[in-house]
Amino acid sequence: MRCKNCEGTLRTDYLYCPSCGGKVIHNRITVKNLWHDILDRYFNLDNTFLRTFIHLFTKPEVVIEGYLHGQRKKYLNPISYLGIALTLSGFIVFLMARSLGDMDFDVFNTGVQTVYQEKLMDFVLDYQSLLFIFYIPVMAVAGWMCFDQKKYNFAERTTIFMYTLAHFSLFTFIPSILILAFAPSFYFIFSIIGSLTMVVYSGYVVARISSSTGMALAARILLFFFLLGILYFLVSAMIPVILLLTGQITLEDFRPKP
């Protein structure tokens, strides 16, 4: 028999191909073996996903710099990790769309509700994945001074924050589901707190990877937060401009509802 991945010759008792390492599949897909494959791939204690998830909490520098320096087998690569995060975030978007009527966007209890807020949320839901990906290079730009001693280029910094944002998205997946299921009115507040927590986690990753110490490290992290805040504000300000230019909103939409 031949390997279905590399066409190499296999003995009938082989479980894995000696040429490419691919698992030899003998049986047709059933619900049972499909479920077993999912559990084995993502939740087995020896698999790369679970190891990557845990170590991005405890030693993110080992995971991220390991990939940057050529380690490709021990941990899940950033593209696959981001793909899992985006897939699960799609489920959150689905729940958000169903819970929009129960969400409270008036965080400061001003009593003001506008058509713009509703259209903005529709836009965010439609382009959530694109916005999520767009913030990765934004963070890479904000972190340009954080790793200058290691001379990481833009692509390498993009990899650092790809891992960072994907990991934070996966970490908040379960809490997001619980909030949307049982207390959707608090989801907007939860998302604000989550955004602040994401910034803190990003600072933690920067601190673990940067070669600086003491006051120099603190200064670099503060600069990262400052630049990230400015860039986040600019990107957020671009959204209503884009909506205005494309005719999706008008100036009348900014007025409070009667």
Image: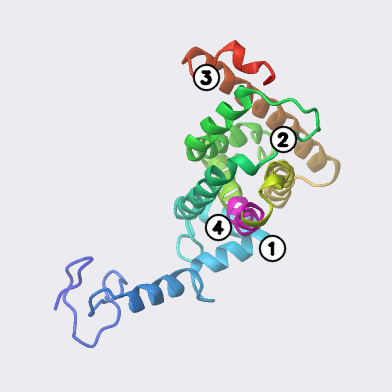
- Mark sitting earlier along the chain (4/3): 4
Q: Position of residue 183 (x, y in %)?
A: 69, 52
* Label 3–label 1 contact, CB within 8 A: no
Location of the N terminus by quadrant is bottom left
Foreground mark, 2 or 3, reads: 3
Q: Which residue is mark 2?
A: 224
Distance in Å between CA atoms under marks 2 and 4? 23 Å
Q: Which residue is mark 1?
A: 58
Magenta region = 167-180
Q: Which residue is at the far front?
A: 258
- Mark sitting earlier along the chain (1/2): 1
Identify which amino acid the numbered label 2 is placed on: Phe
Q: Which type of secondary structure does the marked residue at label 3 adopt?
A: helix
Q: Position of residue 255 (x, y in %)?
A: 67, 16
Q: Position of residue 187 (x, y in %)?
A: 68, 46
Foreground mark, 4 or 1, reads: 1
Q: Which residue is mark 3?
A: 243
Above or below residue 202? Residue 24 is below
Above or below residue 44? Residue 127 is above
